[in-house]
């Protein structure tokens, strides 16, 4: 389909009449489908991490490790929960500006901060778990090799996550430039 045909088809479409109250109800937090999915994921993750924290002390020998290791584990598990809450709040208040261009600028600056927090929080979380599970292990050559493989997986994951965020930020930047 050529551009002029597409444009005439677009202009021929009639916009449905929707009242302001209907739009407000569609945008309310409880009915928004994306926010509902984020809340569902957040609830499942909080329940899962809560079960893990309730069981780790006896199942993974948390009682035999120093208190500071247990605190470190709990803090490293709280980080993804806080990150997800931050993401929910971020998705809840997308439009913050008087124009689309200003709103995109604000969104892009917030996404940059969120991207950094996302990458760093994931690494802190993984390192906290790794530190907890490797504390007081007597390492030999095989275990050092396994630890090296785990470190390599962490590094690969770090690179992949960084690339994903760079691609997202570039896409948002390109969208912003198209308005100029």
Image (cartoon, grey):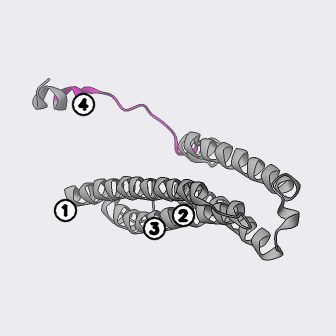
Q: Give the residue at x 56% y 46%.
A: 27
Mark found first going from the N terminus, 2 or 4: 4
- Marks 1, 2: nearer the viewer: 2
Q: Report the quarter where the C terminus lies.
A: bottom left
- Please report whichever mark, 3 or 4, sits nearer to the chain's N-terminal start: 4
Q: Please provide percent x and percent y for residue 17.
A: 45, 34
Of callouts 3 and 1, which one flags the residue occurring earlier in the amino acid sequence? 3
**Residue lying farthest bottom?**
68
The reply to whether callout 1 and callout 4 are in contact (CB within 8 Å) is no
Q: Which residue is mark 4?
A: 10
Q: Along the horizontal axis of the image, is 173 left or right of 164? A: left
Q: Secondary structure at mark 1?
A: loop
Bounds of the magenta span?
A: 8-21
Marks 1 and 2, Cα distance to the nearest angstrom?
A: 36 Å
The residue under label 2 is 123
Q: Is residue 113 left or right of residue 44?
A: left
Q: Residue at x 14, y 25 (%)?
A: 5
- Describe the element under mark 4 as helix, strand or loop: helix
The residue pinned by badge 1 equals 180
Q: At which x and y percent is residue 125?
A: 61, 63
Q: Is residue 11 magenta?
A: yes
């Amino acid at each position: 389909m050529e551009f002029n045909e597409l444009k005439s088809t677009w202009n021929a479409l009639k916009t449905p009449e929707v009242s302001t109250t209907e739009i407000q109800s569609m945008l309310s937090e409880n009915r928004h489908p994306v926010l509902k999915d984020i809340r569902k994921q957040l609830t499942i993750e909080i329940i899962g991490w809560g079960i893990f924290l309730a069981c780790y002390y006896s199942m993974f020998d948390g009682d035999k490790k120093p208190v500071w290791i247990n605190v470190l584990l709990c803090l490293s598990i709280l980080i993804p929960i806080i990150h997800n809450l931050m993401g929910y709040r971020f998705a809840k208040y997308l439009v913050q500006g008087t124009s689309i261009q200003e709103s995109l600028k604000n969104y892009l600056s917030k996404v940059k901060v969120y991207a950094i927090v996302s990458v760093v929080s994931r690494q802190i979380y993984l390192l906290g778990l790794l530190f907890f599970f490797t504390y007081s292990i007597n390492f030999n050559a095989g275990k050092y090799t396994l630890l090296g493989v785990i470190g390599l997986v962490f590094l690969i994951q770090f690179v992949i996550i960084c690339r994903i965020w760079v691609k997202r930020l570039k896409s948002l930047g390109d969208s912003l430039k198209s308005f100029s």
